[in-house]
């Protein structure tokens, strides 16, 4: 057993010592504001059995917002008015009186713009590009007030959703008291939290010999997961989530006792000083390998875990999700469980891609890496064992929705576990579903897409099309979405290279009973504004100058190169924000917005001609180039992706089997 443990730890540590990794000593995070106290009753990673509250926790129908969210919204919508005023007044809409409109409607939230931001999946690529957008939108950061400024948009927004790598970004910000991106990115005097130059496989290095520290890092993770095993099932996602926590949560040992539901207890959230955070995951029913487009989509928010889909149509109180719910209730003599929603585990659930490894052609990939057949066969056997045990997903056992079937359409009411995977595996790689729900009444969604749809890792609108296609199925539950064109049209018309609005004209939607006009979608794709930000989803580490450059690239996308690409960008953003509100209030669209909508609204034009290798040119101008990175090394980047992924899977797999 000791030998197997050593082998696993060596495998994970070995990948960390690639040339891309720099050694560093972990410091206190002086610039990351203190978080709320850990609230897991065990004091560690493992959940704990506790006495139930006087009012027993229960599952609720998904026939509206929770009372907690509704109460929070009353405070948040009021807090968005002044930041919204700043964003709109900056636009200088000469034929629209911003002050008069906001002042006369400050008590009518249904008229004022309700803004959502959705950050796609895509590993660290998505985190970094998304961070650039949020940094530009955050009025706490330095802003030159130029023509491309969107400063204050984050404070004017009601919802902030993340998925997979985008979920890491959202989770990290909220785990650290909603710290700013620059504070987590830079800190002061070596206090930065986001140190992606040291691989997640290696962990944060203390003083001393690096390999020894990496072994200690994984030993701590193994101990945490084994503690959970005393009462609950564990999977690869437990190890993955603990490893993520060390990089994303500014607390000792990655904050093992921090929970996602504890966000609701933090002062900044109770005061509604930040948007409402949501992470997204897909259900993968037992025995299934491929996640279909009509799979059940679950959301995590500080109050609840659940789904709007008719296949579940319910929400469970997040802080009690591992309690023994049956038919939506806990028996009077039953025990409750708290601490199962550990923050890293929730972030890991939204990014649990391990089942995808089981779809690889193991032999072909092994040959490509030059691995001996004995190694390839060993890896294949390990993955087959994980497949049979269904340990490649995130297990929520007991299933909080056991016996819950209010629609007679449930697919998991008879299962004792709820199996969740990466929220982008159904191709909906942008977390739009929670934000297009009619009960949330969102007017506009800024959809930040860092998907790797093309062979060169750029987006081509696949995530939007998947959401549109799903809206045409029964599982959509009367939730609509604007039409979007094909992948070839995206590439041929440069929709993958610049922002585009979808759903500009509300009158184009034909509504049936119980249907409402969907939000306007402001699609902002990852594109090469100032650096090649199309890095691999599975790259495990980035030199600081490269991660800074990718974040800066995301900021350039958010500001259109500080207005150098479009000097009217701030105006056009304001026009888009107000579009649905003007329609609801039956106010004519100001003439100053016409040119914006002409430029940014997709008008239905298509071009389905075949596209060759997609290699877009720089939009602003290259300000950083990797001299020893993967981008200029041809197949080396592909080999690194496979090798890093395999090292992670092999190491974690062996740990899981211990």
Image (tube, rainbow, N blue to C red):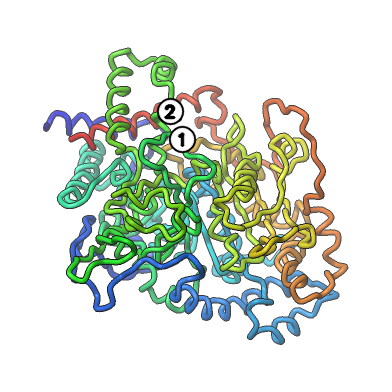
- 128 in relation to 320, above or below: above
Q: Would you call the spot at circle 1 few (<14 residues within 10 Å), some (14-19), or many (20 or more)?
A: some
| Residue 246 pos. (x, y %) | 32, 51
| Residue 314 pos. (x, y %) | 43, 62
Q: Nearer the viewer, residue 10 or 598?
A: 598
Q: Nearer the viewer, residue 248 or 294?
A: 294
**Could you tell me if residue 186 is visible in this image?**
no
Single out the residue that lies furthest toward the top. Answer: 373
Please indicate whether residue 610 sits to the left or right of residue 297 in the image. right
Q: Which residue is mark 2?
A: 359
For the point 57% across and 77% down, which residue is it?
77
- Name the element at disc 1: loop
Residue 23 image-quadrant placement? top left
Q: Which mark is residue 416?
A: none
- Name the element at disc 2: loop
**Residue contact between numbered discs 1 and 2, judged by CB atoms under 8 Å:** yes
| Residue 330 pos. (x, y %) | 26, 66
Q: Which residue is mark 1?
A: 290
């Amino acid at each position: 057993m000791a030998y197997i443990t050593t082998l696993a730890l060596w495998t994970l540590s070995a990948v960390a010592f690639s040339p891309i990794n720099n050694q560093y000593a972990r410091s206190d995070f002086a610039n990351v504001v203190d978080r709320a106290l850990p609230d897991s009753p065990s004091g560690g990673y493992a959940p704990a059995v506790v006495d139930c509250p006087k009012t027993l926790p229960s599952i609720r129908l998904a026939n509206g917002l929770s009372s907690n969210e509704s109460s929070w919204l009353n405070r948040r919508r009021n807090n968005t008015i002044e930041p919204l005023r700043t964003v709109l007044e900056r636009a200088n809409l000469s034929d629209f009186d911003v002050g008069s409109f906001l002042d006369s409607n400050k008590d009518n939230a249904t008229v004022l713009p309700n803004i959502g931001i959705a950050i796609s999946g895509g590993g660290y690529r998505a985190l970094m590009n998304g961070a650039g957008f949020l940094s530009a939108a955050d009025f706490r950061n330095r802003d030159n007030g130029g023509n491309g400024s969107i400063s204050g948009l984050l404070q004017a927004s009601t919802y902030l959703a993340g998925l997979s790598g985008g979920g890491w970004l959202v989770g990290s910000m909220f785990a650290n008291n909603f710290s700013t991106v620059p504070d987590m990115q830079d800190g002061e005097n070596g206090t930065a939290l986001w140190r992606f130059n040291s691989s997640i496989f290696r962990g944060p290095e203390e003083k001393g010999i690096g390999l020894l520290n990496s072994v200690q890092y994984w030993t701590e993770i193994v101990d945490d997961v084994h503690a959970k095993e005393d009462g609950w099932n564990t999977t690869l996602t437990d190890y993955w989530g603990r490893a993520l926590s060390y990089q994303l949560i500014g607390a000792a040992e990655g904050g093992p006792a921090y929970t996602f539901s504890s966000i609701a207890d933090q002062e900044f959230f109770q005061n509604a000083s930040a948007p409402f955070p949501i992470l997204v995951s897909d259900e993968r029913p037992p025995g299934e390998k491929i996640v279909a487009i009509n799979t059940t989509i679950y959301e995590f928010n500080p109050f609840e875990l659940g789904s709007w889909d008719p296949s579940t149509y319910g929400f469970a109180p997040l802080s009690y999700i591992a309690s023994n719910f049956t038919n939506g209730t806990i028996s009077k003599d039953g025990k409750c469980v708290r601490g199962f929603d550990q923050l890293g585990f929730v972030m890991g659930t939204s990014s649990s891609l391990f089942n995808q490894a089981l779809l690889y052609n193991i032999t072909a990939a092994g040959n490509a890496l030059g691995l001996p057949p004995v190694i390839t066969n060993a890896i294949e056997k390990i993955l087959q064992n994980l497949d049979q045990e269904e340990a490649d997903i995130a297990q929520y056992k007991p299933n909080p929705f056991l016996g819950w079937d209010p629609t007679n359409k449930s697919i998991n009411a008879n299962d004792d576990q709820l199996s969740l995977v990466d929220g982008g595996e159904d191709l909906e790689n942008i977390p739009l579903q929670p934000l297009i729900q009619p009960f949330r009444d969102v007017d506009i969604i800024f959809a930040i897409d860092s998907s790797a749809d093309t062979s060169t890792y750029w987006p081509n609108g696949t995530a939007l099309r998947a959401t549109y296609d799903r809206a045409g199925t029964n599982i959509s539950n009367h939730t609509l979405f604007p039409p979007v064109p094909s992948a070839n049209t995206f590439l041929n018309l440069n929709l993958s290279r610049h922002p585009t609005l979808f759903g500009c004209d509300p009158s184009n939607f034909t509504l049936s009973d119980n249907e409402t006009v969907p939000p306007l979608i402001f699609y902002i794709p990852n594109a090469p504004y100032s650096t090649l930000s199309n890095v691999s989803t599975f790259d495990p580490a980035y030199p600081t100058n490269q991660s800074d450059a990718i974040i800066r690239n995301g900021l350039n996308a958010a500001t259109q190169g500080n207005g150098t690409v479009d000097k009217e960008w701030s105006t056009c953003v304001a026009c888009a924000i107000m579009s649905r509100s003007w329609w609801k209030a039956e106010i004519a669209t100001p003439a100053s917005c016409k040119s914006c909508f002409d430029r940014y609204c997709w008008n239905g034009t298509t071009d389905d001609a075949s596209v060759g290798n997609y290699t877009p040119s720089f939009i602003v101008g290259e300000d950083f180039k990797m001299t020893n990175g993967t981008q200029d090394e041809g197949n080396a980047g592909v080999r690194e992706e496979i090798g890093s992924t395999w090292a992670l899977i092999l190491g974690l797999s062996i740990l899981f089997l211990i």
